[in-house]
Each structure stands twice: as structure tokens, then as C-alpha cells.
Amino acid sequence: MRIGLLTEGGYPYVGGDARLWCDRLVRGLEQHEFDVYALSRSERQEDEGWVPLPPQVSRVRTAPLWCAEDDGVVYGRRARRRFAECYGELAAALCGVVPADPSGVQQEASAAEADRFASALYGLAELARDEGGLAGALRSDTAVRALERACRAPGAQRAAREARVPDLLAVAEGLERALRPLSLDWYEDDGLGAVDLCHAASGGTAALPGLLARHFFGTPLLVTEYGVRLRTHYLSAPDATPPIRALLTAFHGRLAAEIYRRAAVITPGNAHARRWQERCGAERGKLRTVYPGMDPSPFADAGETPECADPDTLVWVGCVEPAKDLVSLLHAFAEIRKEEPGTRLRIVGAPTGPEGAAYLAHCKALAAQLFPDEADGPHAVGDNPVSFEEIGGPELPSRADAYASGAPVVLSSVVEGFPVGLVEAMFCGRATVSTDVGAVVEVIGGTGLVVPPRNPRALAEACVTLLRDPERRERLGAAARARALELFTVEQNITAFHGIYLEILSRTPVRRVVLDHTGEPLPFAAPAEAHVPGRWTAPASRVVARGGPGWAMDTPDRTNPVHATEGAAR
């Protein structure tokens, strides 16, 4: 089958989100053909280039999200009126208030607002397809005035009514950026119309082209979210004014709900993401949890030789940033040293950005204050029991070496999605002590100790328990390694998606029919096994979209697939 892989800020670029996962998926499903449609986030990302692509990637099409190119499209009077109506409906859907009524009126009103948003979104997409783009219209005074009218209309949200001109301009800019995929030339018969399935590697903007492919061509959509994009948007732009946050949050919430409603299957990466999706409107019957696939081979040596670990050393591995709460870990280690004076703590990781560098400096100063350098005698050099290190040095050349250097591995985060570092420690056969955040409990599954976040005393007690019980450490480490090898490998991830691809296509009507040498459709010429991987159709057969015989087409194309929905969409 032919898969349209949709990404934003990731694959096939060298640096980006979900790049490694997408690369492993494409390489693992070599029996399928992939068309990659990638949205880039920055000029630097584009300059870094692509990763080497396997032969099953037949096409890569990219578009920038970081700049707004002038497409030179000038609308006539009718097109301007059409844009004002659609954009006004979109703005009204964002500003509207759903009345709280236990009688069911609230649900009906919410459904009506969702339909209103969807109708406006698809109306703008059809306008862009007909006229050549929306770039100029979305940045015009017409858009700002339509947004202002929606904010001043009766029944608008309080935050929307309080919007001032700078707020309206900022919201219009944010909507223009989010709606840039509507102006792309991907929605043609030789583009997304030619794929059998669209697979969005994340929600939000990345899934928007798949949503439009479903609208124009009926292409089924699969959405994978290992980190819920809507949650990320809620946590971003904390300095924005309430009107800006309210309106842009309403847009991204409506978009997420529409994506979930139209997707054939949604694959969260863990139960934490699944709860977010259900809360945002995803139907439970569409959800299939597929854990991220990781390569266990780099950690095999450490996992098979757990006795090499230093039993008196605690290890923390990750990116140094405030969300990891190393301050609580250091205070917990102070309590641990009172019970087990010979214990050492290795903090292994590099800071992320200026904020991370400042946080690392703060943690080093705190460690120096809590643990003065110790010396064995009056003539020996003092040493601090807490060490800050980075991977790549002579002592710790790899992440596996970092995990192997200690017995218990500690995770002290206050915010966490899918804990990749925890899975790596499990591959290494290490017992773990973790805080109860994100998907930690789901990943651990009883093979480690879990304590509340921001509780140094509880963290210290759990660590002391494992330090004093080597048999329990060994038992938990073995169970953790077995669980990780069963659930979190690349093989299980690829197998799960291969099955989901076949499941979706088995429930999708055939959108193409085979023509004979005279151009007439051949009944029953597309068998059920046509959706099974492989070349089942003879090379001489010609395929067109379902929607009628060749004579019903305005301009029949005897060489390329043509979808009948094109005429209806235009």
C-alpha cells in the first residue's frame, strides 16, 4: 500500500520531533511505499538537511511553517466575499459560548459549534484550492475585522469581548500561521489524493493535511500522538494576554476535536495521552495504544551483566532542566547520606538551552552547599559525593555506560510524558525509583518503586530501601528488563502499525476501479486482497477513482488515477 506520512518539524529532517521513530517505522515496513509530506519549523532545520532515506520512500514534499511566503494571489469580489463569510464563521466558532445546561442543550450546542468550525475550515480549504492560496487573505484587514466582529457579537466569551486591537492582530497572526497548510498544493490527484492512507506523526498542524485529504478524496486518516500537541499549546506562551490565549486555545481545541472526529484510528503512546484525547473528544472505540519503539541492543551488555553495577551509587540520567526537579533529588540525597553515608550520586546529562544552563549552575551550587568536599585524611584531596557529568567522556562513553555505573536509577521529574530514560534503565536491568508523573506508573508496571513528586523524604526512603536490599534490586531489575523487552521494542511498534494499516484499509471502500483496454470499468476487478501488501494488479491495468465510468469524467485521464471527488470539491 501507499502511505502518506505527515510530519511537522521532524522526519526526514536531521533534527526534529519523532524523527527516530518515523525512520524506524519506514525502514521496518519495507513492503509498503511511503510518500513523506513534511512541514519544517525553522530555516536552521532545513539547512541541516535530511537523514538518509530508504528506497521505500518514493517522494518527499516539504513546506515551511516558519515563514509566510507571498503567493501573489489577488482575490476578486466574489472570492473576497466568500473568504469573509468562511473566516467570519471560523472566528464566531472560536468566540461562541456554550451554555451550561444539564438537560442536554449544552451537548447539542457544542456539537453545533463543532460543525460550524468544521464547515468554516473546509470552506477556507476549498477556497484556497480554487483560488490558489490564502496567504494574502489571512493577513488582510478583512480577517482582522471579521475577528473583531466575532469578539463583539452578543454571546461571545468574556475574554474575547475584552480583546483590544493588539490582541486581535496577534490572534490573526496566530491563525494565519496555523492555517498555512490550507494553501499548499498537496491536495491534488498526484499528491495526497494518490495515497491509500494518511498517517500523521502528531496531532495539530501535522494532521491538518490529512484532514483535508480525507475531505477532498476520502483518504482514511491515522493519527499518532506520543505527546499531545494540544497539551503542549496550553503550556506555551504563558506571557500572552487572556484574550490571545483564549482565542488561540479555542482554535487548537476545535482543530483537535475535528481531527479526532474524522480520524479512522488514533494511536496514543500511553494512557496519559489517551486520557487527554478522550477529554478532547476522541471516541474510545477509535483509540489503540501503541507504545514507542526503542532499540534495546545498545543496552544489552548492561542488561545481561547487572552484577557489574556499583551497589553504593545512585544514577540520574537525562536532560538538565527545571522540570526534572534535581533540587528535590539533591535534598533527598542529603537524607540518604544520613542513613547510608557511603552512597554516591551521579547526575549525568547536559543542559537544554540557557534556562537549563542556569538551572545546572544552581544545582551545582546547591550540591556544594549540602555536601562539602570529603577527604579520607588530613593530607588527602577532598571529593564531593555528588558528581555532574556528561555522556561522551572517557568514563561514560554511552548512555548504557551511565546506567550501568550504578545500582538504582532515579527519576525525580515533576513533568514527564513518556519516560524514555526510564525504559532505557529497564533495558539495562536496573531497579528504579521514580516520581508518579506522566506515564511513569504505566511504564514501570510494578517493576520499580514510585513516589509522589516534590517529596524528597519519600524519594529518599525508597532509595534507601533498594540500597539495603540487593536481592530485591536484582529481582526488580530482571522484571523491568523483561517488561521492556516485551512492550517497548521497535519490533512490537512496527508490528502494531502494520496491523493497524491493514485494519483501516479493510474497512475503507475501494476508491479506484480498473479499466479495460476500451476504457470501461471492469466489475470486481479490484479484489479484497488488493489491500494486502504486494503488487496484485497487472502492469497493463489502468486505475481511476471510483465515482463512475470513464465517460462520466469531464476529461478522462487514461494514465493517472483521477478521483471523482475532485469535481465535487471544485
Image (cartoon, grey):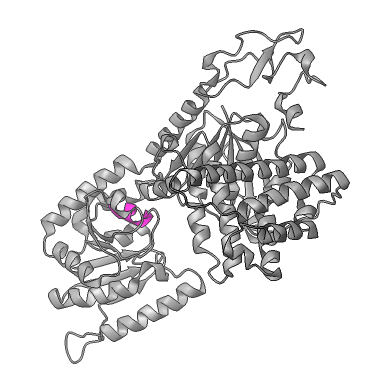
Judge left or right: residue 425 versus residue 189.
left
Which range is magenta?
Answer: 419-427
Residue 81 drawn at (x, y percent): 82, 47
- Nearer the observer, 169 or 185: 169
- Nearer the observer, 522 or 112: 112
Residue 148 drawn at (x, y percent): 71, 61
Based on the displayed image, in which of its 4 quarters is residue 566 positioned? top right
- Nearer the observer, 411 or 267: 267
Q: Quadrant of the N terminus?
A: top right
Q: Quadrant of the C terminus?
A: top right
Q: In the image, what residue occupies the spot 71% across and 69% down?
A: 165
Q: In the image, what residue occupies the spot 73% across and 24% down?
A: 562
Residue 272 drawn at (x, y percent): 38, 50
The prevailing secondary structure element of the residues shown in magenta is: helix
Residue 76 in sight: no
* 456 magenta-colored: no
Judge left or right: residue 47 versus residue 286.
right
Judge left or right: residue 314 versus residue 285.
left
Location of residue 53 with respect to 415 vertically, above or below? above
Residue 238 drawn at (x, y percent): 53, 69
- Nearer the observer, 8 or 360: 8
Work out which residue is located at the far bottom of the displayed protein and give it. 378
Location of residue 485 with respect to 319 vertically, above or below? above
Work out which residue is located at the far right of the displayed protein and give it. 76
Location of residue 123 with respect to 457 vertically, above or below? above
Residue 272 in sight: yes
